[in-house]
Image (tube, helix red, strand yellow):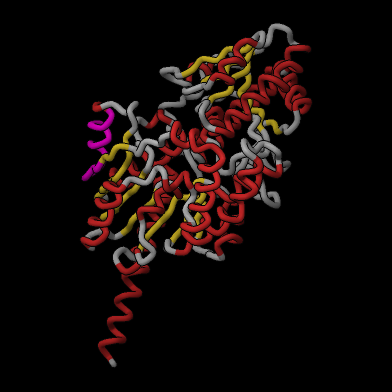
Amino acid sequence: MNILMLSATFPYPPTRGGTSVRTFNLLKHLKQQGHHIALATHRTSDVTDAEVASLKSWVDELAVFPRPAVNKHSSERRGALGKVQRLLNFAISGVPPSVRTTHSKPMQSWVTQQIETGQFDAITCEHSVNEAYVPQNIAEHIPTSVVNIHSSVYGTCAHQLAGRTAEKPWRDRLNLPLLKRYEKRYCQKFSHLVVTTAEDRAQIAELSGKQNIAVIPNGVDLDLFPMRSQDPGGQRLVFIGAMDNLPNIDAVTFLAQEIFPQVRHRYPQATLFLVGARPNAAIRALGQIPGVTVTGQVPEMTPYLHESTVCVVPMRTGYGIKNKTLEAMAAGIPVVASDRGLEGLTVDSGVDGGVDSRTVPLRALRANTAKGYAIAIGQLFDSAELRNQLSQNGRALIEAEYTWAIAGRQYEQLLVNSIHSSRQYHSSRQYHSGRQ
């Protein structure tokens, strides 16, 4: 297969996290299977020349473009008028500001040229934001087109409003119907949609009216997240994740300010490590709470997981399967997480593969309130047997169902089947046209 991949985030190194780790591991699998990969991506100031060179070794053709800079100071000077203008632009163009301001004209020109060559069997957008580079008539040039949605922007906004975790509720209430229209529109031009959970599939199907939606979960590189050799015991909690991500900011604030004090009341020696790059001032301030450490960026996440007693994933917003949950379970650390933190790992009607159903081994503890978290964490602090149970069962689940090798095979099969069906369709049309 000749595949044109688009990624607005630079997908290297695989430890970068977020959408980057998914994009890299999917393209890695496709390349290892002998497929031809041409990748267009953005580069931010923190991407090194060495990282560009390393990524180049994983693709056949790499086109790297500077990520467009957003002039925040200009927006601040315009104040309320600027906000109204952005809303009007969204309403008229149908494109959210987050997509429009990160759109690169040089990258668009390159992508358009590649599409028009007719040499590609498939085009993939490795996040919904990349859909802006794909024309409405893409089927005339490349029959197989895939958007890797990751999570619904409309669904995320609606959930944040419902849970009262929206950063700017007034803005999001105005944006909500526009996001619904936008997501429904862009879904129509793609031959296939990919999401990470069954919950997102149901939501996108209802929104778009399309049925060609595949669920391909995230995975874990088992070499990067090996099973820990022993239970460290103690009373040490950890959260891992990028600290400039709004759902993560909400989660760590909830964890440090509401959950941890309840844990600390019963276990005065308990500690909490908030591990992740780019913490803002508000997150850094959480380090002033007794027992809380904000690390900032670290060379490796795995040692922090292996040395902790419990990993807490108190997500209150954000759709899609969570890498942080999968990685913690792979590393063998017991997990206490919310419904959002365990999304994609839940059980529907008793189907095997979940984390806390009566029909499967217990693989994680679930909580959604500060009190619920404190109780679950206390259970794990007090029981080495329960910790071991979750550690062993969690690792076994990841090995069986959530590796990047598994996700890569599913992605490849989707592309192969789609291309095969498209070729059969066109052959049939040519045959019938010739008989007329």
Task: Please give left or right for residue 327 compared with residue 173 in the image.
Answer: left
Q: Position of residue 387 (x, y in %)?
A: 66, 22
Query: How many numbered marks appear?
Result: 0
Give the residue displayed 62% in from the left and 45% down from the top.
172
Note whether 23 is above or below 50 in the view shown.
below
Q: Quadrant of the C terminus?
A: bottom left
Q: Is residue 52 magenta?
A: yes
Q: Is residue 196 visible?
A: no
Q: Position of residue 78 (x, y in %)?
A: 49, 38
Task: Please give left or right for residue 282 compared with residue 259 in the image.
Answer: left
Task: Please give left or right for residue 52 compared with residue 237 in the image.
Answer: left
Task: Name the residue nearer the viewer: 270 or 380.
Answer: 270
Q: Position of residue 198 (x, y in %)?
A: 59, 51
Q: Which residues are magenta?
A: 51-63
Task: Please give left or right for residue 202 compared with residue 408 in the image.
Answer: right
Q: Quadrant of the N terminus?
A: bottom left
Question: Which image quarter: residue 396?
Answer: top right
Give the residue displayed 44% in from the left and 35% down from the top.
74
Q: Is residue 406 visible?
A: yes
Q: Is residue 416 magenta?
A: no
Task: Name the residue nearer the viewer: 128 or 305.
Answer: 128
Note whether 132 is above or below 318 in the view shown.
below
Q: Position of residue 268 (x, y in %)?
A: 73, 7
